[in-house]
Image: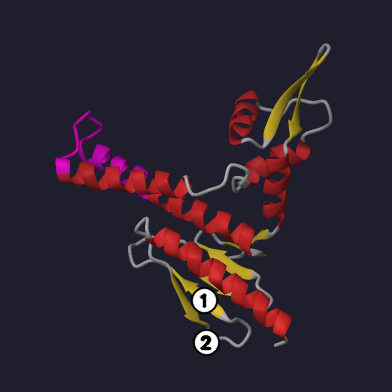
């Protein structure tokens, strides 16, 4: 490995250590370990807290990240995109657990409006607060991770047109990927810089077959 490549990968690894340390301060302990595969320099392991974010996640010698998540998506990206992915996916996992726990409690109570016991309510509240703190680590110009429906709507948006359906247009504007504009007697939506970046991130993802 040349000196320049060595410096680049060391810089990437230090950025990863700093990021994982920041996540660790929120109680999410990912681990960076030497890779057993010669194609990679390091692997990132999930926290031991039933928070399964990546099936696999490794760093190549060129500083790019190869990842495969539990929703059967995989991709290759640089550190900036990886930072957004690991924060967003981890926060979403906690939100999913909160939603699941509330649903199970509601099912247990046959849908009646019965308050959770204090210990369980505290666990759910702590988990939800952790997810919100993780989301707060994202930068203002970081794009959201789009799903297939979002991608289709944005790609099908024509010049001087309004995204459809209306509720999706509203939601995507709230995400910051669309902006509503007005021109004399026209109303239309345009893709924002954040939207362009979100589509770029989405282009790096493919769904693995099962």
Residue 54 showing in the rendered view: no
Q: Is residue 104 above or below residue 12?
A: above
Q: What residue range appears in magenta?
A: 97-118
Q: Give me the residue at 75% from left, 22% from top.
A: 181
Q: Nearer the viewer, residue 44 or 51?
A: 44
Q: Secondary structure at mark 2?
A: loop
- 113 shown above or below 74: above
The label on residue 94 is none
Structural crowding at the residue carrying mark 1, measured as other residues with C-alpha within 10 Å and reported as few (<14), some (14–19) or many (≥20)? many
Using the rendered view, name the quadrant where residue 10 is placed.
Answer: bottom right
Does residue 130 belong to the magenta stretch? no
The residue carrying mark 1 is 43
Viewed as shown, does residue 74 lie left or right of 128?
right
Position of 59 compared to 97: left or right?
Answer: right
Instruction: Give the colouring mode of the picture.
Output: secondary structure
Residue ID for mark 2: 36
* Residue at the image point whose x is 24% and y is 48% from the top: 123
Q: Nearer the viewer, residue 201 or 113?
A: 201
Q: Is residue 14 visible?
A: yes
CA separation in Å, label 2 and label 1: 8 Å
Which quadrant of the figure contains the C terminus?
Answer: bottom right
Residue 54: give x, y in percent of width and height: 49, 65
Residue 111 sits inside the magenta stretch: yes
Residue 90 relative to residue 85: left or right: left
Report crowding for label 2: few under 14, some 14 to 19, many 20 or more residues within 10 A (C-alpha).
few
Of callouts 2 and 1, the N-terminal one = 2
């Amino acid at each position: 490995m040349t000196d320049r490549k060595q410096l680049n990968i060391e810089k990437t690894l230090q950025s990863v250590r700093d990021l994982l340390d920041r996540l660790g301060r929120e109680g999410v302990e990912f681990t960076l370990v030497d890779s057993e595969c010669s194609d990679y320099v390091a692997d990132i392991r999930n926290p031991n807290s039933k928070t399964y974010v990546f099936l696999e996640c490794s760093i190549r010698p060129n500083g790019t990240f190869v990842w495969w998540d539990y929703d059967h998506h995989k991709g290759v990206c640089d550190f900036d995109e990886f930072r957004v992915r690991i924060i967003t996916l981890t926060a979403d996992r906690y939100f999913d657990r909160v939603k699941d726990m509330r649903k199970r409690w509601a099912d247990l109570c046959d849908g009646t409006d019965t308050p959770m016991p204090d210990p369980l309510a505290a666990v759910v509240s702590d988990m939800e607060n952790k997810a919100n703190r993780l989301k707060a680590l994202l930068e203002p110009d970081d794009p959201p991770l789009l799903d297939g429906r979002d991608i289709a709507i944005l790609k099908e948006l024509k010049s001087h047109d309004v995204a459809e359906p209306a509720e999706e247009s509203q939601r995507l504007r709230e995400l910051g990927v669309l902006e509503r504009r007005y021109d004399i007697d026209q109303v239309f939506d345009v893709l924002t810089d954040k939207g362009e970046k979100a589509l770029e991130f989405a282009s790096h993802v493919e769904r693995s077959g099962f």
